[in-house]
Amino acid sequence: MDLDDILALAETTPSPLELARARRVARTVQSQHDLSLAEGYKIIVDTDLADPLTWDADEAIRVTRAAQLAKQGTVTWLPGGRDTERLSWSDEMAMIVGHAPGTLRLTPRTLADLVHPADVERVLAAVRTAWEQSRPDEIGFRVVQPGGSVRHVYCHLEILTDAGRPVGVIATGEDITALELARQEQRRLAVRSRMLGPDPAVRDALTGLQTRGYVIDEVDRARRTTGGALIVVATEPANRLPDALTDEDRDRLTAEIARTLRAVVGDGVTSGLVGSGSWGLLLAPRDDAANAETLAARIVEKFRNHLFSVRQKPLRLNTSAGVVHFGNDIPDTGFDLLVDGEHAARDAHRNATAVKVLEQPVAERERTDRCRRRIHRAVTANRFALYAQPIIDLGLNQVARHEILLRVRSDTGEPVAPWAFLDMAERVGEILAVDKWVIDHSLELIGRGAQTSHYQVNISGKSLADPGLLAFVTEAIHRHHVKPECLTFEITETALIENRNEALAFATGIREVGCHLALDDFGTGYGALAQLKYLPVDLVKIDGAFIVDLCRSPADQAVVSALVELCHTLGIRVAAEYVQDTETLDLLRAAEVDFAQGYQIGRPEPITVSQEEVQSIELELRLPPQQTAMG
């Protein structure tokens, strides 16, 4: 061969078959490479593949031999006439679909039956297109083996031609189940990673510190392991704040106090907002706890000497602290120790001292009695206030309801968020007294109004265990002349339902009276889905944890969409809380949520005795969001 022959050979255009051969070899190498990587093998040497298609053999034999060398199987179909039609497969292909070689008589029907029913039409369409266009193609599909096992197969379709006319099909296939499962797992992990967000129970959005629940959990961990000391710092304005002060003003003050606290203790100490004006700090192990009293005194001094600002006016804080030392493996819970610290801080304030130190936790009976006395004094002295927050009907695009929020008055008469107070009342079994106060006073306000629309009164899930609650509510409805059809009773903290039978009896009875039923904080309480099954619920409120970051969280969007679809399928209306911007409102409309409330709609306002101007009120005893100081 001279130079002219070499140049002539180089200028030759590859035939379609030669191009198909090249693609097949490349795909084989790539497939083996991907499978090796998926199975964790490292490629440490290069491999030269000898192309068997250069042999002097007919096209079908070449394809079959190439597949055998690559541990792949082939199916060959030569239509011809009735007597000349040939359909055969290699032993490797028979084993891929779960049959021993030579045990199955192959026909077009039996071949189609091996393909997963959901993939049959797609496979037939690919073969038909490749035949009509006389060009190779590839397709992945599932096969069902005789025992019912499903395997993933990837096939390359080659069209056999004679004088440019298609005369047959060769499908070269390989079992890629391991590779496909690895790819599916990679896709799943990518989706899971994208959907994961920060745990809202870890850090408070307003203060940047840990939440009350997180601090309690950390104290529980310390009491089981190393022991330590808990510091509770109580703060309140030295003088009464203006009545015109809004929740937003109080939030700004809370955030400023948090920044000052962080400047004193640094970021290495577990610290957080544990109540309205109360701050908890954990020092562990016990060696670090020896400095707890000194740190508490330094915080108190800093707060007392610092000029805070409210509406550009200086404000000083009355500050005191309680310190509780505890060993490891004690029976008292993290909540118990927090209550002891709060009481110690209150005692320090009454005694005009900076810090009160408890060398060990208080006895359980003494702690419980003190909590109960505090709750009874608040109920009998009417140290509560009711606020109303508007709720918009997204279908009508107008305010149709108001939610009434509970406030607890501090020692100075300042209304503060009740979440720590309600937590204590539920844990010591005194929430029923608070519920009855709210029910009675709320229905009294409703009875004085026009009752032109709908009103909702919430009841703690723990109170449903009381068999006399239904009679109390029914009597209050009649006494205050409230229309039952204008009332919905909303169960809060459904995870706290202690007696399913009593809860069902109350729900059934309240429906018989003519009222409706709702569930609050839906999506986070244990057994919430089961409660939809047996409680006659008319409305659910999606927990605010799914709403506050809705615009930036694909996971929250997926949860809200699924919950709305579920509830509407069951004939239940849906409300969303904590709506803080128009983007969130637009997403809720798109998801077909029925009602929305939050600062974007309107902030809570004190309720006056005259209710004629209120078209519709939702009365609720609930734990306000911990993202804000006032809820």
Image (spheres, rainbow, N blue to C red):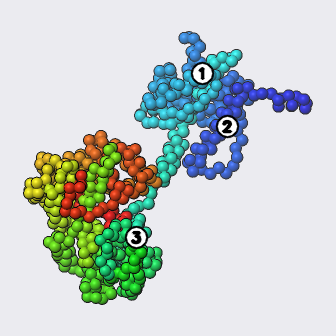
Residue that label 1 marks = 131
Q: Is residue 229 visible?
A: no
Q: Amino acid at mark 2?
A: Ala
Q: Amino acid under label 1? A: Trp
Q: Which residue is mark 2?
A: 26
Camera-side mark, 3 or 1: 3
Mark 1 lies on a secondary structure that is helix
Mark 1 surroundings within 10 Å by alpha-carbon count, few (fewer than 14), some (14 through 19), many (20 or more)? many
Residue at 65%, 40% in the rendered image = 29
- The local secondary structure at tag 2 comes to helix
Instruction: Judge from the rendering whether residue 464 lies leftward or rightward of residue 226; answer left or right.
Output: left
Instruction: Pick whichever of labels 2 and 3 is earlier in the sequence.
Output: 2
Between the residue at mark 2 and the residue at mark 3, the CA separation in whole angstroms equals 65 Å
Q: Position of residue 516 (x, y in %)?
A: 19, 48
Mark nearest the camera among 2 and 3 is 3
Three-letter code for the amino acid on which mark 3 is drawn? Arg
Q: Which residue is pictured at 17% across the width and 70% down the height? A: 382
Can you identify the residue that label 3 sits on?
252
Of mark 2 and mark 1, the one earlier in the sequence is 2
- The C terminus lies in quadrant: bottom left
Kindly check if marks 2 and 3 are in contact, taking CB atoms under 8 A apart as contact: no
Disc 2 + disc 1, Cβ < 8 Å: no
Residue 559 versus residue 379 in the image, above or below: above
Residue at image coords 62%, 44%: 33
Q: Is residue 586 left or right of residue 129?
A: left
Mark 2 or 1: in front is: 1
